[in-house]
Amino acid sequence: MGTVSRFERLWTIEEVSDYLGIPVKTLYQWKWRGEGPPVRKIGRHLRYDPAKVRAWIDGLAEAA
């Protein structure tokens, strides 16, 4: 039986853009304004935790 990691791979900004159906530029604007899903900067790269992106979306639905 193989080992299953409890950690999911972090998403790139392009993957989050595809998942949400919004332009990459919008994600950069949200980061600059402190809006949008939580993002981490790892070196020069932005990375998103898929679980936190999903939780952020759920929070939007609850606020509406």
Image: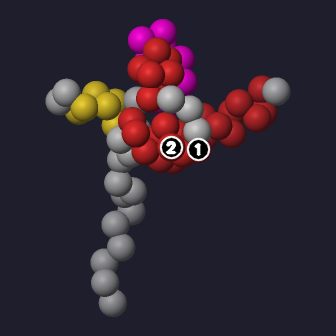
How far is disc 2 from disc 1 in space, using C-alphas? Answer: 13 Å
In the image, is 12 to the left or to the right of 60?
A: left
Side of 34 where 62 appears, left or right: right
Can residue 52 be seen?
Answer: no
Which label lies toward us, 2 or 1? 2
Q: Position of residue 31 (x, y in %)?
A: 43, 18
Give the numbered dot on residue 63. none
Q: Position of residue 58 (x, y in %)?
A: 69, 39
The answer to whether residue 28 is left or right of residue 41 is right
- Which residue is at a point 36% across and 73% down the rendered structure image? 4
Q: Which element type, helix, strand or loop, lies under badge 2?
A: helix
Report which residue position mark 1 lands on.
Answer: 54
Mark closest to the chain's N terminus, 2 or 1 = 2
**Residue furthest left as drawn:** 43
Query: Percent from the top left, x then y, of residue 3?
Result: 31, 78
From this view, report whether residue 26 is shown above or below residue 2.
above
Q: Residues within 10 Å of mark 2 (few under 14, many from 20)?
A: few
Image quadrant in which you'd find residue 32: top left
Q: Residue at x 46, y 15 (%)?
A: 29
